[in-house]
Amino acid sequence: MASYSSCPSIKNILLLDSDGKRVAVKYFSDDWPTNSSKVAFEKFVFSKTVKTNARTEAEITLLENNIIIYKFVQDLHFFVTGGDDENEIVLASVLQGFFDAVTLLLRNNVDKREALENLDLILLCLDEIVDGGMILETNGPLIAEKVTSHSMDADSPLSEQTLTQAWATAREHLTRTLLK
């Protein structure tokens, strides 16, 4: 059996509003076992980063033995958390992929109201990026395409799917097989 200890992993992906309240969050680690500990972590991260200028490019910080990559756009704050031994470039690529996919899904209108109206797409986006802490995809346009094509039946014949959809289906089946 293959060891996944050397694979980069994500502890959580957070999308908070400009007040530090949840818009969409997903945790992949047991570091925060209760909902109250998760909310406390979100408030802590927000309070430590809110004064920074992460509007043009992603910023990085080390808080409580976690590397946190973050970026702010209008009234939304994007965060990706990994362990202190994770590669910052990998975490930054996850953040950029998430941001790019959300930007495409919200048609360049990235704000809280639009995000809440399309919360289902954002949550699907999180599912396409990371599964159980393992990074599946970091390419924003591909993530957005997979999210929008979820209405397509995955069991439909390959002849009825586009080449990209067929490739995504094949990759999903391979990933499931390898992770069993």
Image (tube, rainbow, N blue to C red):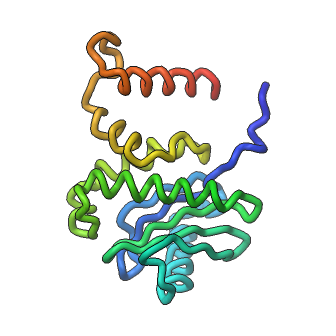
Q: How many marks?
A: 0
Given residues 73 and 77, the one toward you in this image is: 73
Which residue: 34% across, 55% down?
102
User: What x and y, as percent, mark residue 30?
Assistant: 65, 56
The front one of 79 and 55 is 55
Q: Is residue 54 above or below residue 124?
A: below
Side of 120 relative to 84 (left or right)? left
Residue in view at x 39 percent, y 61 percent: 24
Q: In the rendered image of this protein, does residue 124 appear above or below residue 85?
A: above
Q: Quadrant location of residue 62?
A: bottom right
Q: Quadrant of residue 21?
A: bottom left
**Direction from residue 173 to residue 179 in the image, left or right:** right
Q: Position of residue 75 (x, y in %)?
A: 32, 76
| Residue 153 as seen in the image, left or right of residue 139 | left
Return the residue found at the far bottom: 51
Quadrant of the snapshot with the N terminus: top right
